[in-house]
Image: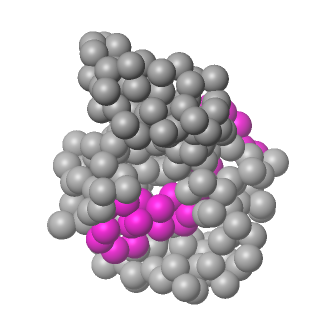
Amino acid sequence: MEREYKFYGWESADVHPVNEEYRLIKDPKALYDILSDIWCSETCAPRMRDEWTKENKTLGQCSITAFLVQDIFGGKVYGVPRSGGNFHCYNEVDGRTFDLTSEQFGDEVLVYEDNPEQSREEHFKKEEKHDRYLYLKAELEKKLKKLSLIPLVDAAAKGSIEAAEKLALGYYHGDFGERNLAKAKKWGSYAAKHGSQAAGELLLLL
């Protein structure tokens, strides 16, 4: 059963990563899926933190999310004027407008036209906001490292020596999170047994 998306512009958010680093994120919907497990009170704007709940997970996440989206898909960040001189940030990429954090407004209808472009330099003058952005980005990268394991393990299980070698080296260097020397030895032994010179050299270090 496919997930039901409710964020603004999800239907037309058919854009793709602009660099290899984020190749595992197919489109904004895939990013939304991952961020749904990351957004938390720590990434929420401090003034809204007491109101944040798992049921309203996009509350207070707009600017750091929008600039992270820009890192991944390019485009521009715009802001819907709000009270107190604040802006609710959203994205426009290749003529497609979407807002991963729009659900926090419930039934309120926002206007996504003729709004001012937002600058990360201006937003990140607030140290706490920049820190939240860096935290969100770091947590995303952790998730992506774990996701990169899936095709490698699948290929190695089917007999790919190259995949087994990559797993061994990845576990040794901590590319999938924390180093795991036991798994590095496991996959390294398999790859070396089938002719991998790099895996053989790695085993000498274990």
| Quadrant of the rendered image containing residue 38 | top right
- In the image, what residue occupies the spot 48% across and 83% down? 119
- In the image, what residue occupies the spot 73% across and 76% down? 127
Please say if 189 is above or below 88. above
**Is residue 153 in view?**
no
Please say if 44 is above or below 1. below
Instruction: Return the residue nearer the eye: 131 or 144.
Output: 144
Q: How many marks?
A: 0
Instruction: Return the residue nearer the eye: 206 or 151.
Output: 206
**Is residue 86 in view?**
yes
Residue 177 left/right relative to 19: right
**Which part of the image, by quadrant, shows the C terminus?**
top right
Please say if 152 is above or below 43. above
Instruction: Return the residue nearer the eye: 56 or 134.
Output: 134
Residue farthest to the right, as pictured: 50
Residue 171 colored in magenta in the image: no
What percent of the width, then of the height, locates residue 155?
29, 22
- In the image, what residue occupies the spot 32% across and 21% down? 194
Residue 48 left/right relative to 161: right
What percent of the width, then of the height, locates residue 54?
66, 33
Which residues are the magenta region? 51-77
What percent of the width, then of the height, locates residue 83?
62, 73
